[in-house]
Amino acid sequence: MLLGDAFAVAGDPAQMIQITQSLLHQLLQLLQHSPGIQRVESQLLLYNAGSIDEPFLAAGFAMYPRLFMEYDLTPHKPAPAFSLPDHIELLTWSGDYYQAAAELIHESYIGHIDARINDQYCSLHGSLRFLHNIVRFPGCGIFDAQASWVLRNKQSGALIGMLLCSRVANDVAHITQLCVTTAYRRQRLGLALLEHCIDHLTRSGFAAITLTVTEANHKAVKLYQDSGFFIRHRFDAMVLDKS
């Protein structure tokens, strides 16, 4: 079960939080006593981390702080330099990559903290469903194939890295996925994908790039901050697993 968002309108912010918490208490009690529901996931992006924790903690949820980060693009910023080893090629996204991309996502998140937050990462079938949701449905914006790329080993043809982007406003892009297979990490391939994305979107007239990342994923957070992203908002991911 996925709890996507909660909304309340009140003149006073404290009253708004109180209303939201009351609604969440009722909903979470219902979900806990509904037969067949073994897992509940939620990421309420609109609420600051810690502001509505009480109903989730009372229901036994695990909490994972996450960061909403932004990179402001300007035409005057110099394009970052990026390079790839000779045996690796950068290719624009194609629907032909679906199966290989799902396999890449699944392998990349084995034992990763994000697999505790999103159980789709825990299986190949779930990773394929996750990929379809990004590419074919507008839940995270409109998928932009021209601003999405894969890295491929020229010799084996295997996908080893990927960056997927969606358009969430006319001039704002959102990175929905950035991953590199385990065997190719620590070779600055994630940085190369990120720098290529920044360069492409700058030249395409975009004003900003956003993304979300789990706060405890320190290497990823450092990569984004070193690349010029800043923290816009801190929110929580909540998970209840009864299995």
Image (cartoon, rainbow, N blue to C red):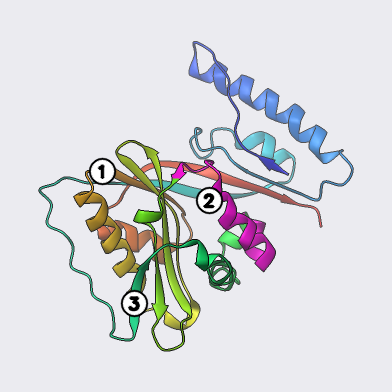
Which residue occupies 29% across, 38% down? 171
Magenta residue check for 7: no
Look at the numbered disc 3 and give the secondary structure of its residue: strand
Name the amino acid type tagged 1: Phe
Residue 206 numbered tag: 1
Instruction: Residue 142: give x, y in percent of width and height.
Output: 45, 43
Q: Position of residue 51 (x, y in %)?
A: 54, 33
- Please tell me in which quadrant of the rendered image residue 111 appears: bottom right
Task: Report the predominant secondary structure element of the magenta stretch.
Answer: helix
- Determine which residue is flagged by label 2: 134
Q: CA distance from mark 2 to mark 3?
A: 23 Å
At a point 10% along the width and 48% down the height, the residue shown is 76
Q: Which residues are magenta?
A: 118-142
Within 10 Å of disc 3 (Cα), the crowding (few <14, some 14-19, many 20+) is: some
Mark 2 nearby-residue class (10 Å; few <14, some 14–19, many ≥20): many
- Residue 123 in view, yes or no: no
Which of these two is toward me, 64 or 143? 143
Does 8 sit above or below residue 25? Answer: above
Q: List the residue tagged with mark 3.
A: 89
- SS state under label 1: loop
